[in-house]
Image (cartoon, rainbow, N blue to C red):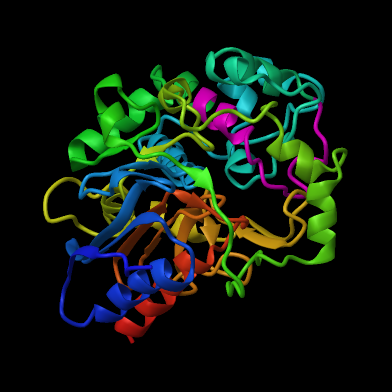
Amino acid sequence: MDATEVHGSVEPGYEPVRAAFAGNFARRGDRGAAVAVYRQGRKVVDLWGGTAAPDGGGPWRQDTAQTVRSATKGVAAACLLLLHQRGQLDLDAPVGTYWPEFKARGKERVTVRDVLAHRAGVPALDVPLTPGQALDGVSGPRAVAAQQPLFPPGAEHGYHAQTFSWLAGELVLRASGRSIGRFVAEEISRPLGLDLWIGLPEDRVGQVGRIADVEVPEPAVSGGLRTRAKQSVNDAYADPDSLTRRAFAAITPLPDENDPAYRAGELAASGGVATARSMARFYASLVGEPADGPRLFAPATVTAARTAESDGPDRVLVVNTRFGLGYMLHGPSSPLLAPGSFGHPGRGGSLAFADPGTEIGFGYVTNGMQRNVTADPRAQALVRALRECIR
């Protein structure tokens, strides 16, 4: 098979990232992907290659965007932290202060901080939503508000894989009067000039490639939840009654993520669409001054985002995880650049994060979804290469 041509550029000193990116196509099963890095407001890596869909469908272009799955959560978290930064949302107030219906069935003391730290206790629904209900803007918040906690809120944590959509989206709506998609457009994407959406506009449909599951080449090497996971993890995903399986099945049947209706839906946990360049620039704007456009987070907000709130056994992912306020933190289950880094992976591939110490913003998006949750071997190869560049 011919080698995949890599397009774009890297600044001198970042050649290892280009080599790792090319290696993803040659050895790690990438079909179409892009990676970008900003450092101290300057773009130092901007690469893309392959096809816009895993099975072909034309080339991946400079502005090709993709659904980034749970990497969306990092953007959604920024909305809540910006509202807090502006005094419109108290992290330690009960969710019911803003959303009275949420107080039902023993959730009176669940705080906004608990939501961001995956401690709200509602990672799954007793009655899953259909794809149509998940997107209607009403059924999701109503179901989460009516759900009895599945573990003691505030005392333990478990990844809210799908329900984070309605928790974050409804809090933004109640605190700001705007849907989360509109908030992202007006407060993040437009000021920074980003191709990043929670709710893809109809006139951008042609810019987005397709995603699909692909086989993992053997042997696959990664950190975090490896392709060959522990038996306890495999058992949890296989058991239809486990909290793990139920959390990921909060929308049943699984939605078609290539459906324009899904991409247009404002699912803050999993439905974001972005280019790698925009994800990198978004995260760079959290921790440093962009060359043009606003810095989004004040230093105190950066500290809050990357300070561990939940650290230890995860009731859903069945491994130890570390969360700050809405962000996964650097650790064995989700390796990022350095101990101070914070960001979010997307199940199956994508990864985006910020590193305050180096003022780096990193974004990787792919259309080939492999069997992983928190640490993809392709993303990790790029992170290792970037780490080599900044030593």
Total marks placed: 0
**Residue situated furthest bottom in the rendering:** 391
Q: Position of residue 301 (x, y in %)?
A: 40, 51
In this view of the protein, which residue sits in the foreground, 42 or 226? 226
Going by the image, does 290 lie left or right of 207? left
Q: Residue at x 26, y 37 (%)?
A: 189
In this view of the protein, which residue sits in the foreground, 181 or 149? 181
**Residue situated furthest left in the rendering:** 292
Magenta stretch: dominant secondary structure = loop
Q: Residue at x 28, y 49 (%)?
A: 60
Q: Position of residue 256 (x, y in %)?
A: 54, 29
Q: Which residue is drawn at 36% across and 84% down?
A: 388
Q: Is residue 20 magenta?
A: no
Residue 270 against residue 231 in the figure, above or below: above
Q: Is residue 163 magenta?
A: yes
In this view of the protein, which residue sits in the foreground, 133 or 3? 3
Q: Can the viewer see residue 298 in this picture?
A: no
Per the rendered image, the range of residues in magenta is 148-170
Q: Where is residue 177 in the image (x, y as percent from the top left)?
A: 40, 17
Going by the image, does 222 lie left or right of 127? left
In which quadrant of the rendered view does residue 361 lie? bottom left
Q: Is the C terminus in the top left, top right, bottom left or bottom right quadrant?
A: bottom left
Q: Can the viewer see residue 72 in this picture?
A: yes
Q: Which residue is drawn at 58% across and 75% down?
A: 221
In this view of the protein, which residue sits in the foreground, 256 or 296? 256
Q: Is the N terminus in the top left, top right, bottom left or bottom right quadrant?
A: bottom left
Going by the image, does 15 lie left or right of 249? left
In which quadrant of the rendered view does residue 134 lie? top right
